[in-house]
Structures are given as C-alpha cells and as structure tokens.
Amino acid sequence: MEFGFTLKPDHSLTRHVDLTRRAEAAGFDYGWIFDSHVLWREAYVLLTLMATATERLRLGTCVTNPATREPTVTASGLATLQELSGGRMDLGIGRGDSARRVLGKPPTSMAMLEESALVIRDLAEGRGVEYEGTWLELTWAPHAYRLPLWIAGYGPKAMDLAGRVADGLMLQFADPDLIAWLVGQLRAAAERAGRDPMAIRVMAAAPAHVGPASVARERVRWFPALVGNHVVDLVNRYDPSDLPAALTGYVRERPGYDYLHHAEVGSANAAFVSDEIADRFSIIGSPEDHIAKLRRLAEVGVDQFNLYLMNGDEEEQVEIYGREIIPALRGVTAH
C-alpha cells in the first residue's frame, strides 16, 4: 500500500514546507493539497514550494475543478511544475465543491469534467488538442513526463468516467463497505471500456488520528459533514435506490453547511455526525487499530491511503505513521 497526505492550505508557508519535508522523510509517497483559492492560500504557489523542498514525493491537487481554473491554465501550470519537479506531478480533479460553492456557484457537469480532464492531460503531456473550436498546443511542454489523472467522485457517473479514462479514482472516505461497492462499479466500467480493471488505482482519502478513540473521534468528526455536501448532491441527482443506504442515510438530519468552517476540527457543521459515522468514515484509535483498518481497505481494492493531515498534532501524527504504520503496510497489496 502507498501512503499520501493532504494539507489544508491554512498553515504558514514555513510550516507547510516543514510538514511536507517531514512526511517525505517519514516514508509518505504522495503529497496532495486542497484547491479552494478563496478559503485558503493559492495551491499552485504551495505546490511549487513542495516541489522544491522534496526529492521523491509525487505531488498534486486533491482536488481541483475545471471551472474556477480554466483547463488550459491548469495544463500550463502542471506542465511547468513537471519541469520543476522532474515529472512528479499528478492531476486530481472533480466537479468542484468548496471552490465553487464559496463563489455562489454549483459544481460543474460530468461532461465538462470529462472534457476538461482530458484536455489538461493531453496539453500537459505535450499533445495538441482541439478545445472549444480552437487547436491548442503547449509546444514547450515536456514530452517525457506522464500526468496521471485521478477522478474524484462517488456516484455511478463518476465511476463510469474513471473506469473509462482515469489512472486512479479518489474516494473521500475510509469505509470499507462503501469502497467495495464503488470499486465494483469502477471495475465493471473499466471492463466495458476494454481496460484492465486492476490497472486503475484506488485511493481512500480521509482523516486519521492516532490516540484514544474518544479523543481522536472529535478530531475527525468534521469529515463526514464535508462528505455530506457531495452526498446531498448525489441524492438530488440520482434515485436514492441507486445509492447505498449506508452512504445516503446519515445526511437526512443535516441542517446545512458553512463553508467558512470547511474542513475544520470542532466546526458546528459536524453537530449531526454520530460516533458511528465518524468511526466508519475515518481511521482512529491505536496504531494497531489503524493497521487493521488499512488492511481491510486493501482487501476491498485500496492502493493508496491519503491521510488528511489537518486534525491537530500534525507533526506527531506524521512521525507515528512513519515509525509504526507505514512500514507495517508496505508489503500489503490491493485485492
């Protein structure tokens, strides 16, 4: 199993770089960053700092979207970062949540997501494309580097898209049962598209906190409230019978969401989140508890665990993962 971490861009620049260096030294493989330019600091400036501060980490957005950043701008930024980093960039992209909603705008369509993701990948890899009636090419873009494409989403259309075109799927929770259901859809879509379903990597992205369960649970309770934004959107677009009750049931009592307290420990957004949901969606408890749940995630198809490193005591958590948890999972492969 591979390990990534995601930073919320609300640290000082110095601490952001320090956490990145610590994570690379601890054995993490990927460094990801939220992209919500109004709520937090600019992601591409921070990715530049992360690239110059590291030697081995792959880096990317978790996630960007095709509307707040015009696709050719994103392609140009990532192609430049490929040069800077020696080809260590990945593209994580979805329809857009906080970055769009804080502007008073809804997420984009799946069709726009698909077109934009392919345009970004082609341009950043040095291929010409026709986009909105115009032939475009970044003639300077390095041809030597691939830009792995990760699609973020939950619903049937997102699984179909990822199965057809993506290198990886980003799932924003650590619930083995729900992930198994979605991985089944992903692999079926890949088979329909004539692709090897096992070649598409699966990420579980969620907060994890090592410590007594009663303490750790309060550090991660914000997370299912964040996921609830996407679930409500799914319920509005699909027949609830097409979605598992374990995914949709917990948002029935959701009162609303304040984006000024997005991804924030202790936020009132999480008041409706039960202990059971907090436990299912995140990873808490002793190092042994983390290792056991990560093994279950690998059994249902997870290749990478992406630790949302924003629950307090970040330096300590990185050290514990590097010393006790990452080494225990190195030989474990996804099923």
Image (cartoon, rainbow, N blue to C red):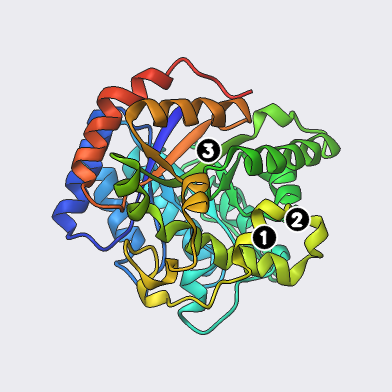
Distance between mark 2 and mark 3 Cα atoms: 34 Å
Secondary structure of the residue carrying numbered label 2: loop
Q: Which mark is residue 243?
A: 2
Closer to viewer: mark 2 or mark 3: 2
**Three-letter amino acid code at the position of disc 3:** Arg
Earlier sequence position, callout 2 versus callout 3: 3
- Image position of 94 (left or right of 188): left
Q: In this picture, is 287 found above or below 211?
A: above
Mark before the other along the chain sequence, 3 or 1 = 3
The type of residue carrying mark 1 is: Thr
The residue at which mark 1 appears reads as 248
Inter-mark Cα distance, 3 to 1: 36 Å
Relative height, residue 149 to residue 299 (above, below): below
Crowding at dot 1, Cα within 10 Å, few <14 / some 14-19 / many 20+, comes out as some
Instruction: Specify few, some or many for label 2: CA neighbours under 10 Å numbering under 14, 14-19, or 20 or more.
Output: some
Q: Residue at x 31, y 53 (%)?
A: 310
